[in-house]
Image: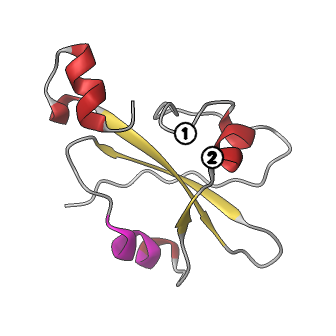
Amino acid sequence: MLTSQEAADVRGVSLNSGAKAIVLAAPGDYEKLFYLAVMSAGRRFDSKAFRKIIKTKKLRFATNEEVYELSGCLSGAVPPSATYSQNQSKQSLTKAFP
């Protein structure tokens, strides 16, 4: 599955009843910082608002390889309560965007 709508259809529920977890990467002082943004599946991710919250100008979606290395999950299958490898730099941030 590639979309939240496809996942909702498979589960037989409305799109707004689910959550989506988005793994993001931003430059840090010494290494990349990773964020887990959790939001309603029915909302669009607002990159500008998120960058303002974490006080950075650069932000990107984590690559498929980074997602797997961090969470052990394939991109698109990261649960909203994903755990990260102990040896990885990480930050977790949950924010609902209006």
Residue type at mark 1?
Ser
Q: Residue furthest bottom?
A: 57
Q: Position of residue 91 (x, y in %)?
A: 63, 55
Whether residue 25 is situated above or below residue 93 in the rendered picture: below
Question: Residue 4 colored magenta?
Answer: no
Amino acid identity at mark 2: Asn
Which residue is identified by label 1?
A: 75
Which residue occupies 23% across, 34% down? 5
Query: Crowdedness of circle 2 by 10 Å Cα count: few (<14), some, many (20+)?
Result: few
- Residue 48 sits inside the magenta stretch: yes
Q: Residue at x 52, y 80 (%)?
A: 55
Please tell me whether mark 1 sits on a helix, a strand or a loop: loop
Q: Is residue 25 left or right of residue 66?
A: left
Q: Residue 81 in the image: state x and y as whole percent.
A: 51, 32
Crowd rating for badge 1 (residues with CA inside 10 Å; few <14, some 14–19, many 20+): some
The region drawn magenta spans 46-52
48 over 36 or under it: above or below: below
Locate residue 23 relative to residue 40 in the image: left or right: right
Q: Secondary structure at mark 2?
A: helix
Residue sitting at x 41%, y 69%: 50
Q: Quadrant of the N terminus?
A: top left
Looking at the image, the residue that sits furthest to the left is: 14
Is label 2 in contact with label 1 (beta carbons under 8 Å)?
yes
Relative side of 3 to 81, left or right:
left
